Image (tube, helix red, strand yellow):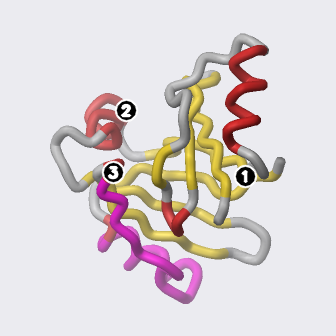
């Protein structure tokens, strides 16, 4: 496993991109709406890591609930896995609490699943296409 990205919940993706351009000298490498999760995301690729900025696009988005409760900030850490079904099966056997027992649609055509927060940080599993 390796870290794929760190997800940061934000109120306004456009405002964040302005800041990102000032700090990193470039805008987002990818902006995508993920309708199944009711979010719009902007990815910033760095030399050996990525940041994902997440904006809720619906009042009933889980990210909107997160923002209302905790404000802007780190939402999750995403770990890339090779076989998401097998990883979920093993984690469940080990007693890890799963938000998703089956993968769902993620960014960039991936499949993702979330674990319940660990010390206040959500963990996302991601299987790339």
Decide which of tag 2 and tag 1 comes sooner along the chain.
2
Q: Which mark is residue 64?
A: none
| Residue 54, quarter of picture | bottom left
In the rendered image, residue 15 lying in the magenta stretch gets the answer yes
The numbered mark, 3 or 1, whose residue comes first in the sequence reads 3
Residue topped by disc 3: 36
Say above or below: 92 vs 60: above
The span picked out in magenta is 14-35
Q: Residue at x 38, y 79 (%)?
A: 18
Rendered image: mark on residue 70: 2
Residue furthest to the bottom: 25
Task: Please state the horizontal and vertical placement of residue 92, each as a whole percent of the image.
Answer: 69, 18
> Is residue 84 toward the left or the right of residue 48 in the image?
left
Q: Could you tell me which residue is drawn at 52 percent across and 61 percent down?
A: 52
- Disc 3 on helix, strand or loop? helix
Q: Which marked residue is nearer to the observer: mark 2 or mark 1?
A: 1
Query: Circle 1 sits in a helix, a strand or a loop, which is it?
Result: strand
Above or below for 122 versus 19:
above
Disc 3 versus disc 2: distance between alpha carbons?
22 Å
Query: At which x and y percent is residue 49?
Result: 72, 66
Query: Real-space Cα distance between discs 3 and 1?
Result: 20 Å
Q: Is residue 4 shown above or below 16? A: above
> Does residue 117 show up magenta in the picture?
no
Asked if residue 123 is positioned above or below residue 82 in the image, the reply reads above
Snapshot quadrant of residue 65: top left
Which residue lies under the disc numbered 1? 80
For the point 20% across and 38% down, which residue is it?
60
Residue situated in front as seen by the camera: 20 or 28: 28
- Position of the C terminus, as image quadrant, is bottom right
Q: Is residue 42 left or right of residue 115?
A: left
Name the outermost residue toward the top. 95
Tell me which residue sits at (41%, 64%) in the image: 41
């Amino acid at each position: 496993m390796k870290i794929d990205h760190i997800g940061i919940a934000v109120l306004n993706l456009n405002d964040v991109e302005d800041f990102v351009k000032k700090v990193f000298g470039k805008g987002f490498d990818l902006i995508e709406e993920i309708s199944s999760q009711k979010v719009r995301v902007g990815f910033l690729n760095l030399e050996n890591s990525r940041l994902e900025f997440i904006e809720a696009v619906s009042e009933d988005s889980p990210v909107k609930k997160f923002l209302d409760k905790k404000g802007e900030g780190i939402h999750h850490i995403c770990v890339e896995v090779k076989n998401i079904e097998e990883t979920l099966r093993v984690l469940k056997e080990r007693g890890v609490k799963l938000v998703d027992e089956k993968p769902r649609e993620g960014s960039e055509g991936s499949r993702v699943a979330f674990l319940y927060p660990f010390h206040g940080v959500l963990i996302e599993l991601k299987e790339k296409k």
